[in-house]
Amino acid sequence: METQTAVKKTKIINPLFIFLGFLLFAITCLLIGAFLDLKISSFLAGASQEDWRNHTFGNYFSFIPGLLCALLLMFVGPLLVLTQPHKFKSLHTRIIYLIIAYLLMGGAVSFCAYDGFIRELSYSFVNTPLQSWALSWNVLFAIGVSTIVMTITSLIIHFKIKDANKHTWYKWAILVFVVLAIQWLIVFLLKQNIVRERYLWIMDPNGGKGDESLFKPWYSLIWNQSQGSGFNYASFPSGHVNWATTLIPIVLLPTIIFQRKLWAQICPICFIVIIIAVTMFARVQPGYHFLSDTSTTVFIASVCNLVIYLAIYRLNLIKLP
């Protein structure tokens, strides 16, 4: 008599549901912000410079997503090179590809580390030696650390990742690279071309009484406005939340792809949701952003992740070697 062995089915969370969940969350926050942006900021941030100075949580937590993004990006460069499905013809070709990857990712890591970590500490300790150190040594420090980490990653990839998994890892590395490039470009263009006064600038621009009439709801913002520029007018969208949302393709997808235990898939999802939500709060609390500024970034990230994921994994629109 033949005995049938029960095969235990593994439950894998569909990434589409995650992207759609973030998208629904962003749309909900945008709808709330359309009516309550100013009231929410007034409740959380207060109405004076003394209030904003006392919001140390928002000021200091903001750098954490950028630091996480910088650290995790160090793993993408070697993956993008060493997991390519085709074989390298020679060792020299492999070394050339690695050098290119190190330069590209080293630059990206330096940018993340500066904007998300060193710059925030510099703002918190204005006119101190730390600020001059950050401006002088940040790039060299970030590139040096990223090169060391990427070298270690290359050795791990060489000895641990089997040929059968290389194609999947390569698709993930491509997705991360494309998503981040498009997402960062969109956020950068919006910040440069749409002028929206920060809440703290509206309420207390020169240490005096603010003017709430300067407030503009997100749905009334116009592309390429000529009024003002720089930090005080760069509220829309949130750049710091952009760093937090980059953790979506970097952390969630490989966890879902390679983990077969349900709890091991749910825990990273909860971690990313908490990081994004807390970062949104941390940017509204000190008066740097409105709720709609932060949720717009989540909206952009969700759409980018959704479209690129469909193009690479589901529709195969991006042909891989």
Image (cartoon, rainbow, N blue to C red):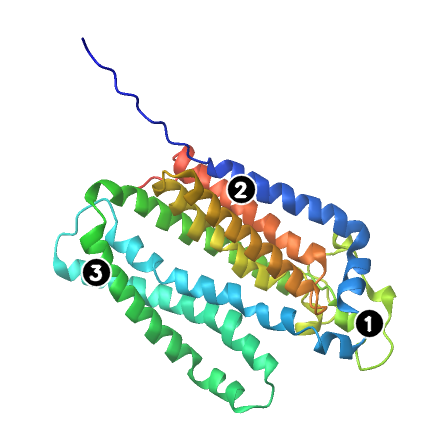
Instruction: Residue 124 in the image: state x and y as whole percent.
Output: 60, 80
Q: Nearer the viewer, residue 174 or 247?
A: 247
How crowded pointer 2 is (Cα within 10 Å; few <14, some 14-19, many 20+) is rated as: many
Q: Which element carries disc 2, helix, strand or loop?
A: helix
Q: Mark 3 near mark 2, Cβ–Cβ under 8 Å?
A: no
Q: Which element carries disc 1, helix, strand or loop?
A: loop
Sequence-wise, the earlier of marks 2 and 1 is 2
Name the amino acid, label 3: Leu
Q: Mark 1 near mark 3, Cβ–Cβ under 8 Å?
A: no
Instruction: Residue 284 in the image: state x and y as whole percent.
Output: 70, 63
Query: Residue at position x 87%, y 77% from top?
Result: 209
Q: Dividing the image into 4 quarters, which one contains the C terminus?
A: top left
Instruction: Residue 317 in the image: state x and y as whole percent.
Output: 40, 36
How crowded pointer 3 is (Cα within 10 Å; few <14, some 14-19, many 20+) is rated as: few
Rendered image: mark on residue 47: 1
Query: Residue at position x 31%, y 53% from top?
Result: 80
Instruction: Residue 182 in the image: state x and y as whole percent.
Output: 49, 53
Any part of residue 321 in sight? no
Residue 109 occupies which quadrant of the picture? bottom left
Q: Which residue is mark 3?
A: 155
Name the amino acid, label 1: Ala
Sequence-wise, the earlier of marks 3 and 2 is 2
Q: Mark 2 near mark 1, Cβ–Cβ under 8 Å?
A: no
Name the amino acid, label 2: Phe
Any part of residue 147 in sight? yes
Q: Which residue is mark 2?
A: 19
In-image side of 317 versus 132 (left or right): left
Q: Dividing the image into 4 quarters, which one contains the N terminus?
A: top left
